[in-house]
Amino acid sequence: MGSSGSNIVYRRVLLKLSGEALLGDAPYGISTEVMDDLAAQIRDVHALGVELGLVVGGGNIFRGVAGSAKGMDRASADQMGMLATVMNALALQDALTRKGVEARVLSAIELGRMAEHFVRGRALKHLAAGRVVIFAAGTGNPFFTTDTAAALRALEINAQALFKATKVDGVYDKDPAQYPDAHKFDELTYQEVLEKDLRVMDAAAIALARDAGLPVVVFNMQKPGNIEKVLAGKKIGTTVR
C-alpha cells in the first residue's frame, strides 16, 4: 500500500457509492468482480485504522426516479429503490466478510433477521469496535435520495468528511464524456455548487453538508489507490467546502 496510517488526515469518513458503480460492464445487477475489487480497497483502507461508514445507492437494480417517470407512484417507486440499496448492502457485506473485514448492515427500514435496524448509538458502537458499517435503505423515507442519506449519516456518525466515489475524476462544468473541453474544478464552495447547479449531489445533501461544514470530496474510485490518497489529504478529485 502507498500510504501508511500516519499519513491519514481523515480518521472517520462516510463513503458514498453509487449503485451504478457496482455494474462493471453489465447493463444490470451486481458485478462480483467489481464488488471484490471494491471490498479489497475498503479492506486496505480499514487496515490503516480508518473508521468507515458506507452508503450505497440502488441504481444498478432500480431507480425510484426512473420508476416514477414511467408512471409509477413516486413513493412506491422510492420504496422499491430502498429495497434495491438493501440488496447492494448485503452483497457488499458478504464481499467484505470474505476479505476478512467485519461489517454490519444497518437499515433505515425494519428488516427482521436480515439486517440490524439503524440506531445512531449502535452505529457508533460498531465503528468504535472497528467494524465497517453499511447504511442501507436510504433515509427510510420516499422523496429523499441516497445522497441525502449519505450526508445525514455522515453527520450522525460525526464523520470528518463525506467521500463520493464516482467513475470520473471529480466535478466538471459539463459532462467530460461528451465534451472534451469540460473544465474540472479542484475546489468549490457549497454555494457555487448550488448556484452553478453542478450535479455533485442533490441540493438537500449539499445544504446539510454546508450547514454542518462537512467537506465533500468527489473522486474516481476506479483508479487504484485513489481512496488512500484522498484520506491522506492529497489533491485528488474535487473538494467542496
Image: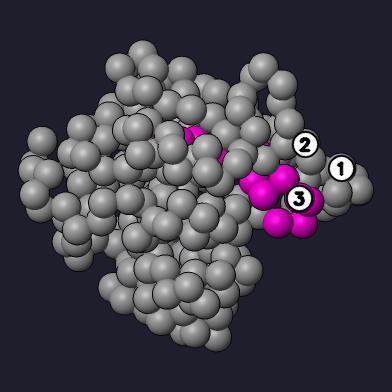
Q: Which residues make up the magenta segment?
A: 132-144
Residue 173 seen from this side: no
Mark with earlier residue (3, 2) = 2
Picture residue at 31% right of the left edge, 18% below the top? 99
Kindly identify the amino acid type of the residue bearing the numbered disc 1.
Answer: Ser
Residue 19 inside the magenta-drawn segment:
no
- The residue singled out by tag 1 in the image is 76
- The residue singled out by tag 3 in the image is 141
Tell me whether circle 1 and circle 3 mark residues in contact (CB < 8 Å).
no
Q: Position of residue 31 (x, y in %)?
A: 47, 24
Quarter of the figure with the N terminus: top left
Q: Is the image coloured rainbow, by chain, by secondary structure, or in one colour?
A: one colour
- The residue singled out by tag 2 in the image is 80
Q: Position of residue 174 (x, y in %)?
A: 47, 71
Kindly identify the amino acid type of the residue bearing the numbered disc 3.
Answer: Asn
Q: Position of residue 54 (x, y in %)?
A: 46, 42
Between residue 160 and residue 186, name the one nearer to us: 160
